[in-house]
Amino acid sequence: MVEGFKDEPVPKIALWRRGVKGEVADLLDEYVIAMASDEKLTIDRPLLDINHPLSVADFIENWLRTGQ
């Protein structure tokens, strides 16, 4: 996991919280494998609950095992 490398070509989970400036679409690039947020979003990737870190960890573990 990395912080501050949003423009690097590495698999990542984008984070979005209600009230953040900008648009969700600004965070999505071809390397974003999922989005973690505190609100319901309509996106073309898995949506994780940012307030449930164990489910985010489960997603990461599954992704590492299966590559998807």
Image: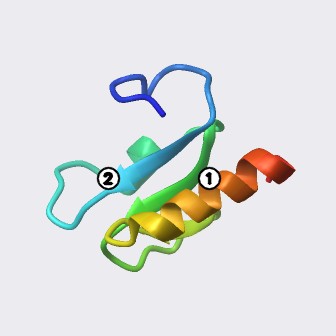
Please say if 66 is above or below 11: below
| Whole-number angstrom distance, CA of label 1 to CA of label 2 | 24 Å
Q: Of tags 1 and 2, which is closer to the observer? A: 1
Q: Where does label 2 land, which residue?
A: 23
Q: How many marks?
A: 2
Residue named by callout 1: 60
Residue 68 coordinates in the image, percent (x, y): 79, 53
Q: Residue at x 49, y 58 (%)?
A: 35
Q: Are marks 1 and 2 in contact (CB under 8 Å)?
A: no
Considering the numbered disc 2 on the image, is that residue within a helix, a strand or a loop?
A: loop
Residue at the limit of the structure toward the bottom, as seen here: 40
Residue 31, image quadrant: top right
Which of 35 and 63 lies nearest the eye of the viewer? 63
Q: Earlier in the sequence, mark 1 or mark 2?
A: 2
Element at label 1: helix
Looking at the picture, does residue 45 appear above or below residue 40? Answer: above
Q: Position of residue 12 (x, y in %)?
A: 55, 39
Identity, as a three-letter code, of the amino acid under mark 2: Glu
Q: Residue shown at 61%/26% (left/top)? A: 10
**Residue drawn at (62%, 52%), measured in percent from left and top?**
60
**Residue 6 vs residue 30: left or right?**
left
Question: Horizontal and vertical percent for residue 16?
Answer: 32, 57
Q: Residues within 10 Å of mark 2 (few under 14, many from 20)?
A: few
Q: In the image shown, does 64 or 8 lie closer to the viewer?
A: 64
3 on left or right of 64: left
Image quadrant assignment for residue 18: bottom left
Which disc is residue 39 wearing? none
